[in-house]
Image (cartoon, rainbow, N blue to C red):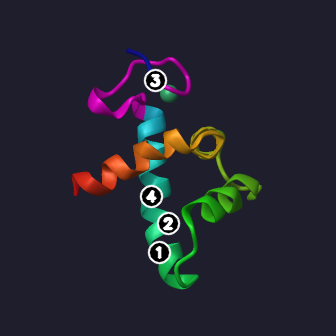
Amino acid sequence: MNCSICSGKMQDKWELCSDHLLALKNIMKAFKAWNKAHDGILKREYLKEVTNRPETGKVVVEVTKFLLEDEKHMILWSKNNQGN
Ligand SMILES: [Zn+2]
């Protein structure tokens, strides 16, 4: 199977290649800090915010857009939260 976003080689159970997996992990890590600072901001609001920031990298935007595109794609995020 290939990465859900770019059709690169998929990492394990993640359905993402190493580049997009790394970007997703960074997004999730940053969300934790944001969530504290913004008193329980929703994931979707956060993802939209990140997408629209001019300094956000291309690979990260590909991940945020992918997650926002379909509610089912959010499962990638939930998977990680169960994982640790
Ligand atoms: Zn990829």
Number of other residues with Cα within 10 Å of mark 2, as a class: few under 14, some 14 to 19, many 20 or more: many
Whether the residue under disc 3 has CB within 8 Å of ligand 1: yes
Marker disc for residue 46 = none
User: Mark 4 near ligand 1 (CB under 8 Å)?
Assistant: no
Report the front residue among 5 and 18.
5
Q: Residue at x 60, y 38 (%)?
A: 66
Q: Quadrant of the C terminus?
A: bottom left
The N terminus lies in quadrant: top left
N-terminal of the two: label 3 or label 4?
Answer: 3
Quickly name the residue at label 4: 28
Give the structural element (helix, strand or loop) at label 3. Answer: loop
Mark 4 residue type: Met
Mark number displayed over residue 31: 2
Instruction: From the top left corner, tell me how far across and down residue 23 is, in percent.
Output: 49, 45
Residue stretch in magenta = 4-18
Mark 3 is on which residue type? Cys
Per the image, the residue denoted by label 1 is 33
Q: What's the distance in space between the residues labelled 4 and 2, CA to CA? A: 5 Å
Disc number placed over residue 3 in the picture, else none: 3
Q: Are marks 2 and 1 in contact (CB under 8 Å)?
A: yes
First in sequence: mark 3 vs mark 2: 3
